[in-house]
Structures are given as structure tokens and as C-alpha cells.
Amino acid sequence: MRIHTGLEAWVSIEGERCEEYGQTLAANGRDVTCWIASEAGKTFSVHWQDRPTQQMDYALIIDGVDIGGKCCVNPTGRLVSMDMTGTRISAIEEQPFMFAPIRQSDDESLLLNSVEGVGEIQIKTGTARFQPAIRTYAPPPSGKTFHERMKKGIDHQTSFGAAKLVAQESVTAYRPVPVGVPTMLTFKYRPLNVLQANGIAPRPKTIETKPVVKQPAIEDDDSEVEIVETKPKTSVKRERTDVAAQHGGSPARKKVKREAAPKIPSDDIIYISD
């Protein structure tokens, strides 16, 4: 997702960049929103890159909670890439971002828990001045439980995975002082089937297959099949003498002495004259 200033941001789930759906631009001409498909139990990370020419602050907000962020104190106009994979709980430990099913209950006291911002990953960016600060660490925010009547179609929220060792930070901490109006990039996340049911993400294409028509089987029943062997025939042409034409009398059949024909190959046809 990209905004008019050239800032580009995206979300990856376990290293694979998410496909974005339904990108919209707010009426103010600055803020941009899109949808991504979340997968419960999988970790995710947030990435962005920019070419700042002024001091810029990039704050990451997940489920309405400010998680921290990055800043560019010495802008040069060159490409700057940033990413966040979790929240630091010490100089060498981090708990990764993870999608999780939303927790719900029928406890009436939970009606006070607001669902505003839940199911959203936001990057708030804008010009700022910076003051040096001391880097502190704290446990990540715990996931909320919501009343079942307040769920309002929100199926996932963000939790944090088990702590893992990471490289020690070597950057200086700053506290931003915003200057001017910020711009918001918002990724709304829901399960893929929810996005498909609401027409936000396309449904998978179905491949039409023609039904297979079985050919009738030919029964081979030896009891109903008779195989007849025939011997090759020898064609013999006999000439008759037209006695009546020669003697003027009634035609008489001339007696012919028949002799046994010699054996011949079955594939030959021989004409014999008397």
C-alpha cells in the first residue's frame, strides 16, 4: 500500500507478503485503508520504506494500542527501510506479533471494553522534532476479552508469541514531538473466509469438469461365441462345349473325368480348364 508522499507499507505473515484488498482513499486525500487476510496462530511483521526529506516519525499502532515505532532524524532523501516484527521486552529479547482468535464472554462487565481499533494495524506518519530519551522496556499489552454482543464481526486480534533472543539494539532512543497533520495507513485484518463472504476478497475459481461417461462394457462370454474355422476354397473355372451350336441338336453335357486336384497353398486361386 502506497500513499501520495511515496511511503509504501505492507504486512507479511511468516515471511510472505500479504495480498491487499479493497484499498480506499479517505476524503481528506491523505489516509489510506485496505484489507488483509489474517491467520490465527501465525506471526506477522510490518514493513515500510520511504524517502524522507524532513525529520519523520513512524508510529505503529495495533488494535488501538501504540506499540512504538521508528524515526528518521537525519533525512537525506535516500530510501530508508524499516520493519517491526514484535515488541522488545529487553535489550536482547522480543515477543513476536501473532494473530489470535478474539476472546469473548457473556460477562456484563466486559461491555465497557471498546472494540475500537481492534482488528487494525496502523502506521501513523508525519513530520516531527525529536528529543533524546532513555530506552525502556515493558511487557507487551495483554489481549482483551470482549462481550459477545460487542464483537461486531471482529474475529481476530493481535497477541504476542513466546519471547525469543534477538540482536541487541544499537540505536539511540528519541521521543517525537509531532509537527503538522499526520497521515494514517490502516490495514484491517479479518479471516480470509470473512473477506470472501463480504465480497472484499475474491472467492477461489472453480474448475468445471465434464462428467465422465462410461462406455458399456462388452461381455466376453465363451458360451455364447462360436468360432468357425473354414478351409480355403479353390476356384475352378470349367468351360462348357456348346454341342447344340456345333451339331444343331439339343445340348448335351460332356462327361468330364475328374481327377484329384493337387494340393495348393491356401492363398492362391488357380483357374483350370477341361
Image (cartoon, grey):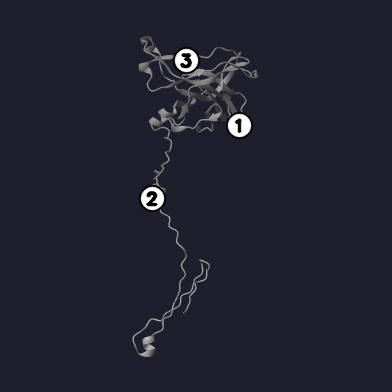
- The circle on residue 224 is 2
Name the spot of residue 259 as percent of width and height, x first. 48, 74
Q: Earlier in the sequence, mark 2 or mark 3?
A: 3
Circle 2/circle 1 CB separation < 8 Å: no
Q: Earlier in the sequence, mark 2 or mark 1?
A: 1
Name the residue carrying label 1: 79
Q: Earlier in the sequence, mark 3 or mark 1?
A: 1
Please identify, in this view, whether the residue under mark 3 or under mark 1 is nearer the observer.
Answer: 3
Q: Is residue 55 visible?
A: no
- The answer to whether 77 is drawn above or below residue 131 in the figure is below
How many marks overall? 3
Secondary structure state at the residue bearing disc 1: loop
Q: Nearer the viewer, residue 80 or 196?
A: 196
Which amino acid type is marked by label 1?
Leu
- The answer to whether 224 is drawn above or below residue 31 in the figure is below
Q: Which residue appears farthest toward the left when viewing the image?
A: 250
Residue occupying image coordinates x 60% and y 29%: 80
Circle 2/circle 3 CB separation < 8 Å: no
Name the residue carrying label 3: 143
State the separation of the CA atoms marked 2 and 1: 86 Å
The image quadrant that residue 91 belongs to is top right
Name the spot of residue 173 as percent of width and height, x first. 61, 17
Secondary structure state at the residue bearing disc 3: loop
State the separation of the CA atoms marked 2 and 3: 80 Å
Please identify, in this view, whether the residue under mark 2 or under mark 3 is nearer the observer.
Answer: 2
Which amino acid type is marked by label 2?
Glu
Which amino acid type is marked by label 3?
Gly
Q: Residues within 10 Å of mark 1 (few under 14, many from 20)?
A: few
Q: Residues within 10 Å of mark 2 (few under 14, many from 20)?
A: few
Secondary structure state at the residue bearing disc 2: helix
Q: Nearer the viewer, residue 240 or 137?
A: 240
